[in-house]
Image (cartoon, rainbow, N blue to C red):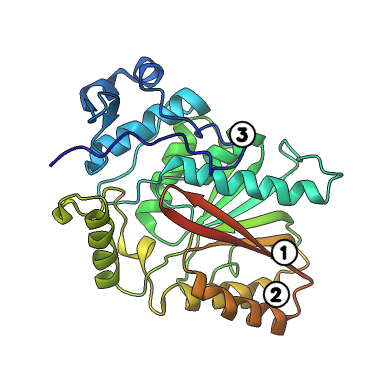
Amino acid sequence: MTNPPAPADKTNLHPRNLHRGRYPFNELTKALPALRQYLTRNEQNEPTINFTDPEAVKVLNQALLKHYYKITSWDIPEGFLCPPIPGRADYLHYLADVLAEGNNDTIPTGAGVKVLDVGVGANCIYPLLGHQAYGWNFVGTEADYIAAAWAQKTVDTNGLNKAIQIRKQTSYNHIFEGIIKPGEKFDITMCNPPFHSSSREVKEKSQRKWEKLGQDTAAGLNFGGRNNELWCEGGEPRFLNKMMSESKQFAGQCKWFSSLISQKTTLPGCYKSLDYLGAAEVKTIPMSQGQKVSRILVWRF
């Protein structure tokens, strides 16, 4: 099996994204020498890593976080989702643009901006990136005990307790209920929902991805992910319908709501639901990273 080529310049990423170019492996290995053992060469004799190796991908993330975001301590438990940082950063930069529209086209920065991350995960990636990039304060919600504890550990070890708060969601049947406190205000909410409807669907799509890249389908999920991170009953449409319904209840406490949308076919149902709920404004922001195409749905009441 040959290693996939090093990613080319990622010009489809947001203009403010720090990861539009090739990974600077020389600088990354200086920031985190442990990355050096995972380096190899592609067919063009350029430095890269084996992106089918979950451990190599995780260590690359550690180097990226340390070099670009000054996050010195980051890890995830075995089997949990290891996020692709360039794409995660893109979501935050597009949300910054949304917030700028209501702020004289100036991106609001600092602790006065409060963001709610639904399903923060063990990786806690959105609060880490968002705080380091814009100084925003975050509340990250998580229903999984292990993920919540791990996210809290990351916050603690990096001394970010004043900027990032982890809250345990006690019910898998609720999204905002039990999390948003009376009188509490958020500028925007965000979510990377479980996109699949079953574990079988997750495996089949992973196999098709590796086949397109000419890789061994036994490589599995190089970015990992537990069941509740990757799929839920009813898949993306059902999860989003629940989120949109609950968002109406908290319209007075959140200026904007948002979510990643993996499947384009999910959008028409979302538009219909938001129209029924009386949303005042709905935006769809296209987003892509390499061959992966997605979009951000943003709404307010």
Viewer-nearest of discs 1 and 2: 2
- Mark 2 surroundings: few (<14), some (14-19) or many (≥20) residues within 10 A: few
The secondary element bearing badge 3 is classed as helix
Give coordinates of residue 69: x percent, y percent.
Answer: 52, 28
The residue beneath circle 2 is 249
Cα–Cα gap, marks 1 and 3: 29 Å
Please identify the quarter of the rendering in which residue 90 is found.
top right
Instruction: Please identify the quadrant where the C terminus is shown.
Output: bottom right
Seen as rendered, the residue at the extreme front is 44
- Mark 3 surroundings: few (<14), some (14-19) or many (≥20) residues within 10 A: some
Cα–Cα gap, marks 2 and 3: 30 Å
Viewer-nearest of discs 2 and 3: 3
Kind of residue at disc 2: Gln
Viewer-nearest of discs 1 and 3: 3
The secondary element bearing badge 2 is classed as helix
Do the numbered discs 2 and 3 sit on residues whose CB atoms are within 8 Å? no
The secondary element bearing badge 1 is classed as loop
Left or right: 23 with respect to 98? Answer: left
| Disc nearer the start of the sequence (1/3) | 3
Do the numbered discs 1 and 3 sit on residues whose CB atoms are within 8 Å? no
Seen as rendered, the residue at the extreme bottom is 276
Q: Which residue is more in the foreground, 271 or 264?
A: 264
Cα–Cα gap, marks 1 and 2: 12 Å
| Residue ID at (50%, 26%) | 68
| Residue ID at (69%, 45%) | 96
- Mark 1 surroundings: few (<14), some (14-19) or many (≥20) residues within 10 A: few
Q: From the viewer's perspective, is residue 73 above or below residue 207?
A: above
Give coordinates of residue 58: x percent, y percent.
Answer: 31, 37
Mark carried by residue 133: 3
